[in-house]
Amino acid sequence: MDTQITRMLAFDLDGTLLKSNGSLSLRAETAIHEAHNQGLIIVLATGRPWAMTKPVADLLGCVDYGVCLNGAVVVDASNEKIIDVSSMSKEQAVDAAVIARNLLGKVALAADMADGSHIWEHSFVFDSPPGLVIEAKKVDDAVSAIDGPVLTWLVDTPNHPGLSAIDILQGRLPEGTEVRPSGLGTPEIVLVGVSKASGLALISNTHSIDSSEVMAFGDGLNDLEMLKWAGRSIAMGNGHQLARDLATEIAPSNDADGVAEVLEALLAQKKLGN
């Protein structure tokens, strides 16, 4: 029997906890509630901003924290208080955007601002998951429109399909910033070291929980750091091959209630251990 102790659960949303149509299954909801009732800390770790994470947290009713924008913002879900923000200075953000444009040619930018607002260029497009609607100020030039610290730049690169733009930008951005997959099919520019794993580490340290006591579920390239950091990492059957290669376990797909299946087995083990 697996005797590994689990004290915290972290769930990516789109492609993991949520089905492909954006819904949350009753089976998964029931299992998460039971885990919370048994004392496990529940975290939603997502590329979404808090405003689009909150509806899922409200539906569950037992979420303790949100790690949002891939770690740039950490929220105490009980009172919706932001407990950590990792933002680029305006100067860093401007320099990074200018370099991206110089190196990539035609790009369209979208900024997640530290004040919670969103600034998108009119030409910015991304493959939005079902149910994800972000209210953004539309502008011709996001670089001149930003007026403060920036959490993330999303970079739409029509001349560089897939994530090939990451290879071009890697190591060429301003000091203290880096490029990574956003989870939306576009590169994302952030402060160095900011990830879902960094957000989860902050929460686990607060509760004196070791990473070995964390179970994390994910499916995408923006989950890799989290899956590597957690002691027990679960990649979804529908997930990216790199996520499946890195994880300690593979669950059935999000549409086959993979999260619920793994949690039900965990809860059954805990009952046997009592």
Image: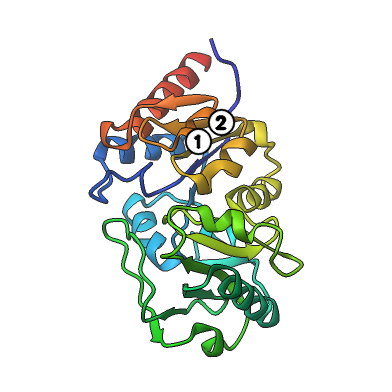
Q: Is residue 28 left or right of residue 7?
A: left
Front-most of 260 and 132? 132
- Residue at the (36%, 44%) spot, across then down: 15
Q: Is residue 4 left or right of residue 68?
A: right
Is residue 167 visible in the rendered structure shown here?
Answer: yes
Q: Residue furthest top?
A: 1
Whether pointer 2 and pointer 1 mark residues with C-beta atoms closer than 8 Å, the reply is yes
- Residue at the (44%, 60%) spot, across then down: 48
Residue 232 - label: none
Disc 1 element: helix
The amino acid type of the residue labelled 1 equals Ala
Q: Vertically, is 155 above or below 77?
A: below
Q: Residue furthest right?
A: 175
Q: Residues within 10 Å of mark 2 (few under 14, many from 20)?
A: some
Mark 2 to mark 1 CA distance (whole Å): 5 Å
Front-most of 72 and 164? 164
Identify the residue under disc 2.
246
At which x and y percent is residue 97? 59, 75
Q: Residues within 10 Å of mark 1 (few under 14, many from 20)?
A: many
At which x and y percent is residue 18? 32, 46
- Residue at the (44%, 64%) spot, across then down: 159
The amino acid type of the residue labelled 2 equals Leu
Name the image colouring: rainbow
Q: Is residue 237 left or right of residue 99?
A: left
Front-most of 208 and 110? 110
Identify the residue under disc 1.
243
